[in-house]
Image: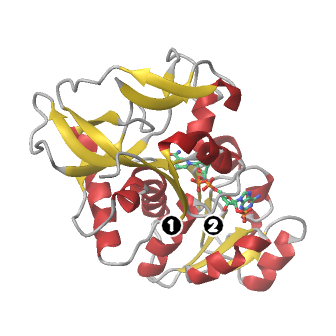
Amino acid sequence: MVKAFGFVAYGGPEQQQFLDRPLPEPGPGGLRIEVRAAGVNPADWKKREGWFGTVAEPPLVMGSEAAGVVTAVGEDADGFAVGDEVFGIAPAGAFAEQTLLAARATARKPATIGFDQAAALPVAAATAYDALQQLQLHSGELLLIVGIAGGVGTAATQIARARGITVLGTAGASSADHVRALGATPVRYGEGVTDRLREAAPDGVDAVLDLVGGTAVRDVAGALRRPGRLVSTADRATVEELGGAYVKRDGTAAVLTALADLVADGTLDAHISARYPLEHAAEAIAAVESGHARGKLILEMNRP
Ligand SMILES: NC(=O)c1ccc[n+]([C@@H]2O[C@H](COP(=O)([O-])OP(=O)(O)OC[C@H]3O[C@@H](n4cnc5c(N)ncnc54)[C@H](OP(=O)(O)O)[C@@H]3O)[C@@H](O)[C@H]2O)c1
């Protein structure tokens, strides 16, 4: 049996518990990995609460991004072998000692980067990468990131800075130093944010990447020089009302490989602010659910 953490009914954190699952067998095109690290994301608690539908029958294993070592290779999962160090999206859940990945959406982990850094890439960093592609930003442009201090914003800032883009971002007062360390200018969110943004960017901004939605993006969308150059990962209804678009995910191994290369060459760092053993999964999920996690939170398991 495999130890995992998940939920037994849709609802709040009280539905979460440890689960004993049978060792999963990879089907055609699938891989099984021994999970070494898994990233924690807002999607974990949103799924538990039924934001993405309630069709799948609990108990369900939580977590959706994992890095680990291949322990079994399914039919037609070409190019992978037992012992390979890989990372990717884990549709069957990542908070488990062993899980399954789809070979076509799995990338190899460079030997020079840790399992923890690799596990932080498939959701937050890949979403940041996709959103920046969608905004079609060029060197010298000015980007505003709403909610810059979390997982997606921390990755987006580093990728954008490496492309010569200047970055401003809304964050709480306690996140200002983190934002500056990324090479961006923090603008404190909350009452008065429109004025503070006007002071920081008197001529407006070229594009907005929204990671929060609602009032947080409405309050700053007026700063856009060209209305509509706005992509959100958090709130489809509001961004479409403002003339922007929801993020389009690529989901291929090519993006994951590009991101791993950026980590390997020192351009990108997940800024892991906390690590937890699998036994403390509930604590890690609660920290993300608070809405104020900084950078990435990681669960670690099967440490050699
Ligand atoms: N569609 C997709 O494929 C996809 C993929 C990834 C993520 N997402 C979504 O994108 C959003 C961001 O994800 P994430 O992983 O970056 O989340 P996260 O790491 O949990 O974000 C936490 C950050 O949000 C900041 N924040 C909270 N309220 C804010 C406000 N009103 N204004 C500005 N900043 C605020 C916090 O800053 P302070 O601590 O300073 O308050 C904290 O640093 C989530 O809604 C997530 O579900 C979607």
Q: CA distance from mark 1 to mark 2?
A: 8 Å
Q: Position of residue 22 (x, y in %)?
A: 33, 20
Residue for badge 2: 148
Q: Which mark is residue 156?
A: 1
- Residue in the foreground of this view, choosing between 53 and 165: 53
Q: Position of residue 94 (x, y in %)?
A: 42, 38
242 with respect to 59 (left or right): right
Q: Is residue 42 above or below residue 162?
A: above
Residue type beneath disc 1: Ala
Instruction: Look at the numbered disc 1 and give the secondary structure of its residue.
Output: helix
Earlier in the chain: of badge 1 and badge 2, it is 2
Asked if residue 280 can be seen in this view, the reply is yes
Q: Residue at x 53, y 48 (%)?
A: 40
Q: Residues within 10 Å of mark 2 (few under 14, many from 20)?
A: many
* Ligand 1 occupies quarter: bottom right
Residue type beneath disc 2: Ile
| The residue at label 2 has a CB less than 8 Å from ligand 1 | yes
Q: Residue at x 26, y 59 (%)?
A: 257
- Residue in the foreground of this view, choosing between 270 and 148: 270
- Residue in the foreground of this view, choosing between 146 and 55: 55
Residue farthest front in this picture: 304
Q: Residue at x 80, y 67 (%)?
A: 189
Q: Is residue 98 above or below residue 240?
A: above
Q: Residue at x 47, y 64 (%)?
A: 132
Q: Is residue 122 above or below residue 197?
A: above
Please tell me in which quadrant of the rendered image residue 73 appears. Answer: top left
Asked if disc 1 and disc 2 are in contact, CB closer than 8 Å, the reply is: yes
Image color mode: secondary structure
Instruction: Look at the numbered disc 2 and give the secondary structure of its residue.
Output: loop
Asked if residue 234 can be seen in this view, the reply is no
